[in-house]
Image (tube, helix red, strand yellow):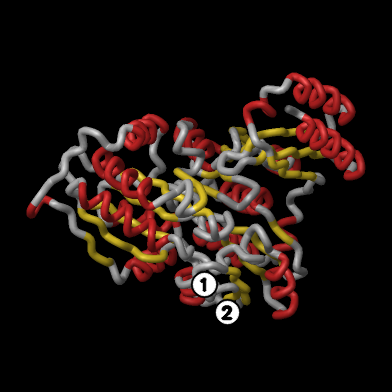
Amino acid sequence: MGIMFGTDGVRGVANRELSPELAFKLGRAGAHVLARDGANTRMVIGKDTRISGDMLEAALVAGICSAGVDVIKLGIMPTPAIAYLTRELKAAAGVVISASHNPVGDNGIKFFSASGYKLSDETEAEIEELVMNECAGIPYPIGGNVGRSYQLPDAPDRYVAFARSTCKTSLSGLKIVVDCANGAAYQVAPRVFSELGAEVIPIFDCPDGVNINDRCGSTHPEALMEAVVSAGADLGLAHDGDADRVLAVDANGRLVDGDQIMVICARYLKERGLLAENTVVVTVMSNLGLHLALQESGIRVVETKVGDRYVLEELLRTGARFGGEQSGHIISLDHNTTGDGILTALQLLTVMKESGRPLDKLAAQMEKFPQLLVNVPVADKSLVMNSPVLADSIKELELKLGGRGRILVRPSGTEPLVRVMAEGRNMEQLEDIVGSLVNIIKGLK
């Protein structure tokens, strides 16, 4: 990753690190690089519900149009919908304004290529270099060659129709509580499930610009867990701010995470001969229980670094089509080119309907090993990760697990944090291990 682009585009506090001036330059540079062959001079742009989205959208649109490229504005739409519509509309590229599950003060800008995939490191580096050099060398067209922008009013209808087309099973008889995180899914997610026949109870579906991810969504599922039990629902679904993730809640109010969803869906696909390369790609954060459950089913597991971009790279490299993260960021290349929380939910609901089994029984296919994760704020992630004291301590503490667990210490790709995770059968032991490592990290100078 470069100075500007992280694992998921350009992120920062809106109107501070991620300023309108920077957004304008990213628009100019992105348009120049991604539409320079002249074969297609349109880009699509969409956003989540953050109050800063309008400001950044205006700057991005100005930058793109100043490079002679037209803009199709999709309005508030899930990130995966923007990836889909980039392909559907045969645009040169797509742009998403969102900071996903982050608090409202943050925002982000990321690009999709014409094929709907995230950009390669090389392409991001080219855009970044242009921005760092004040977009020197990018022409300023005049007259009729300046780009123009226009809305696509039926963007939600197009995505809803696409999402419905991926599910061949009626959802009638299912009662679902859908937590929209006051984010980008608030219009389309309830529509998709209800139009397929489910009884839908939407919650956190009234965004006001500042309540996105506020004690709701996939990072705060507690309210959903209560709502499912209170409503007597069959399950709950929790999206994040841009709806590229989903977590589930069973009828008893218990959380079903991305690892469990992947086990449920992968086994279903395997049984029907639909699991490409008989392989699932996961990250190093996936629970040991996932590995054991998939191995028991004869499914190969490929592990990669944390981040959906690395999952995608490995899917494309191996020819596999299914994988994801414990966080609920799951990619099915049979359906979309990026993580899609709504489509993942539809796959899970299909398994429930076709098997006739409730979610708690399906989730029980995987034994979850206790995991303890602590995020440690740090000033210098490199200093921490290159510390020999920390490295030696990790090796010493891993010996105490005796091969029946693991320790993972890694920097966040988008925040000034180091994440410390330990996994094993004894929670008390995990607390001691994580506590020791947290104290070491805090003491590093």
Above or below: residue 19 compared with residue 411: below
Q: Position of residue 199 (x, y in %)?
A: 57, 79
Of the residues shown, which amino acid type is indicated by label 2? Glu
Horizontally, residue 73 falls left or right of residue 375, namely left
User: Can residue 336 be seen?
Assistant: yes
Disc 1 versus disc 2: distance between alpha carbons?
22 Å
Residue depicted at 23% across the width and 42% down the height: 35
Above or below: residue 188 compared with residue 264: below
Residue depicted at 55% across the width and 72% down the height: 171
Q: Nearer the viewer, residue 331 or 166?
A: 331
Q: Position of residue 254 (x, y in %)?
A: 76, 63
Horizontally, residue 432 falls left or right of residue 18, namely right
Q: Nearer the viewer, residue 411 or 17?
A: 17
- Give the mark, 1 or 2, whose residue is nearer the N terminus: 2
Q: Position of residue 358 (x, y in %)?
A: 70, 66
Decide: few, some or many residues near mark 2? Use Cα within 10 Å; few <14, some 14-19, many ≥20.
Answer: some
Above or below: residue 118 compared with residue 443: below
Q: Position of residue 308 (x, y in %)?
A: 53, 42
Residue reaching furthest left? 143
Above or below: residue 217 compared with residue 100: below
Element assignment for label 1? loop
> Which of the labelled discs sits on residue 207, or is there none?
1
Q: Nearer the viewer, residue 54 or 371?
A: 54
Residue 390, image quadrant: top right
Residue depicted at 55% across the width and 69% down the height: 182
User: Can residue 282 be seen?
Assistant: no
Residue depicted at 40% across the width and 34% down the height: 120
Which quarter of the rendered picture does the C terminus lie within?
Answer: top right
Q: Which residue is mark 2?
A: 199
Q: Nearer the viewer, mark 1 or mark 2?
A: 1
Of the residues shown, which amino acid type is indicated by label 1? Pro
